[in-house]
Image (cartoon, grey):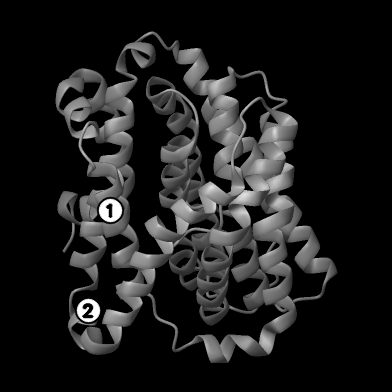
Amino acid sequence: MSGPRAFVRNQFLPLGLVVAAVAGLACPGPGRFMATLPTQHVAVSVIFLCSGLLLRTDEIRAALAAWKATLWGAVAILLITPFIGAVIAFRLPLAPPYQLGLALFCCMPTTLSSGIALTGQARGNVALAVLLTALTNLVGIFTVPFLLTVLMGTLSEVELSAGELLGQLILSILVPLAAGKGLRRYVGPWVERRRYRIGLVSNVALISVPWMKFSQSSEALARMAVAVLVGIVAAGLLIHGLYLAFNLITTRVLGFPPPVRKAVVFLASQKTLPVALTVLAFLPVPEAVKGLVAIPCVTAHLSQIFVDAVIATRWGQAGPGPDPA
């Protein structure tokens, strides 16, 4: 497959997120109506059910040999980068909802799939990427609520209940993820034959969430100046650039071999959009404001994919041996 169809197939999620934003602004009625139903909770459950079905863990044993990289990657993903990102986000010249959205995104675990794909493209240690993805997204369900409570309470005026958020994340993320992983034991071959279709269902479910958020905040978004949007995109690029630089330097200092470094750099520099939007649904802020908070989450997600795709292509063309720089 080549041409426009191949482009849409390969870039379905970023294109879908752009379409969701445009549709929510141009015709907010359907999105607002869907938001009155439990649509978002169903969408989130579908996302993580699909993630559990698609999650391959047979390579994790091979990655356990790189336990030092695994430990450092997990600490960087769950503790160091959230702190760095949140501190910077609340000091940038952005309106409070955009600061909150960017800080929220920075506090998330690593991406559910793109980090693994990019690591493979860069000829990095894919098994380690799988391990870091599974580990940080599972552990993150328990650490993110308490991390957000501390950071938001210290750096902003948003007050969260860590225990309540933890319970909501267990029901919204852990239960469907575990169900999907459990089902995979019985339908694994069927899933492998339909990976793209299942991924497509997950992406459609993910796209539906910001579509509803944008629809609910369409009036405020319509008044947004282009300069503000450019500033939000630039802020996300700034933080992601700092993440990449930090992880490049630390993995070099720690002496990780190039394939391991590539995996850690990608996984520790990316943040997951589905978990961010799930947490956003439970934030104690008005529904109309949540659409504004979602903007930096979406733009930062798109930015990290595009930037890291360029880096992965460069590293992949250089081969598995050269040290990333």
Location of mark 2 (residue): 191
Q: Quadrant of the N terminus?
A: bottom left
x, y percentage for residue 290?
42, 28
Q: Is residue 130 visible?
A: yes
- The reply, left or right, for residue 114 in relation to residue 24 is right
Above or below, 94 relative to 47 = above
Query: Which disc number belongs to residue 221?
Result: none
Residue appearing at x 75%, y 79% in the figure: 68
Total tally of numbered discs in the picture: 2
Q: Nearer the viewer, residue 160 or 104?
A: 160
Q: Of helix, strand and loop, which one carries label 2?
A: helix
- Image coordinates for residue 123, horizontal then vertical, percent: 53, 75
Task: Please name the residue that numbered disc 1 is placed on.
Answer: 203
Determine whether 313 is above or below 27 in the image: below
Q: Secondary structure at mark 1?
A: helix
Residue type at mark 2 is: Val
Residue at the image point whose x is 61% and y is 19% from the top: 94
Spatial CA span between label 1 and label 2:
16 Å
Between 248 and 113, the residue placed more toward the observer is 113
Q: Is residue 210 above or below residue 112?
A: above
Mark 1 surroundings within 10 Å by alpha-carbon count, few (fewer than 14), some (14 through 19), many (20 or more): many
Left or right: where 48 falls relative to 131: left
